[in-house]
Image (cartoon, rainbow, N blue to C red):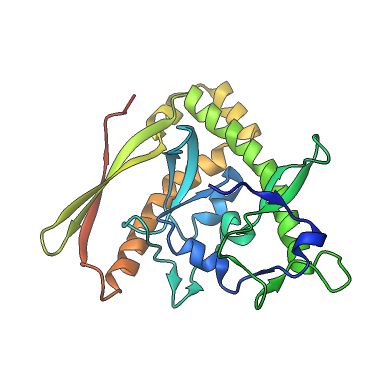
Amino acid sequence: MTDLIEIDVSQHRELKIADGASVAYAASQHLMNIRVTEIDKATSCFPIFFTRNPHSGGWAISAMTSFTPGSNLFVAEQQWDATYTPASVQTYPLSLVRSQSNPKGYAVALDPESDAFSRKEGESLFEANGKASLHLARISALLESDARDELLTRQFLQEMQDLGFIKPVNVVVRYKDGGIETIKGLHTADEDKLNAVGKERLQDLCSRGYLVPIYAMLLSIYQLNGLIKRHNSSANNSAIDKIIVEVSRPVN
């Protein structure tokens, strides 16, 4: 894996973000990680679940974009087709890393070998005078905001885990041709445990702004119906008859 390097005008003055790079990235994302601050907006389009990071094993929040790994039903004809665009798509292909020149600060970085960059066409990172382009400035601001949101997300996920509010579920997909697939590794908020907490704990969750994302996640399950419609509208997909969301046994 190529190490990310800080953006530097002397090295990257001519570099551009290739046209359609963020959409091309999104097209392969079956589950897109989002921050807790995005849940209320993301539920306008996607079912939202708790998932495990496959590398670290830590908790994450993910928007489901299709029933098939490696595909995204919200990318059509190389265009993003959703009313909400996750921050991870808006900031791609740039990242925020610890600054080498300022250990206490952060810097915008890139993978110089990524196909997302071009020297011919796309959005320039720098103007002719060497100043950051408006596009780079916008993404930099989004990355700084996302770094703060990441901390809030970690705190939220830790609270959900400590309270036992994370419930494992399977999404069972039944196709009209008789086929059955089970999507595992998904979790949702445990409404029964939430309803059983005391008044003081409930007020605490409310004061910390946690109730809105919890209930938004629970309501987002109905967006599975929208995913079915998108899936079935494609001639390349086997039509889905129905799906069942069932509680699964937790995997330790």
Where is 39 relative to 120, above or below? above
Depth order, front residue of 11/179: 11
At x 38%, y 50%, the residue is: 221
Q: Which residue is drawn at 50% across and 59% down?
A: 44
Q: In which quarter of the image is residue 164?
A: top left
Image position of 169 (left or right of 159): left
Q: Nearer the viewer, residue 1 or 85?
A: 1
Which quarter shows the C terminus?
A: top left
Q: In this view, does 159 lie to the left or right of 103?
A: left
- Where residue 42 appears, as percent x and y from the top left, is 52, 55
Evaluate whether residue 74 shows in this view: yes
Q: Is residue 48 left or right of residue 19?
A: left
- Residue 175 screen position, x and y as percent: 17, 60
Residue drawn at the location 31% of the way across and 67% of the way down? 231
Q: Which of 71 and 55 is in front in this view?
A: 55
Seen in the picture, residue 79 relative to 227 is either above or below; the reply is: below
Q: Residue furthest left?
A: 178
**Residue 122 relative to residue 131: left or right:** left
Q: What x and y, as percent, mark residue 45?
A: 47, 61
Q: In which quarter of the image is residue 151?
A: top right
Question: Relative to the observer, which residue lies in front, 199 or 215?
Answer: 215
Residue 141 figure quarter: bottom right
Q: Can residue 209 be seen in this view?
A: no
Instruction: Give the mark count.
Output: 0
Estimate the x, y position of residue 10 in percent, counting from the top left.
82, 61
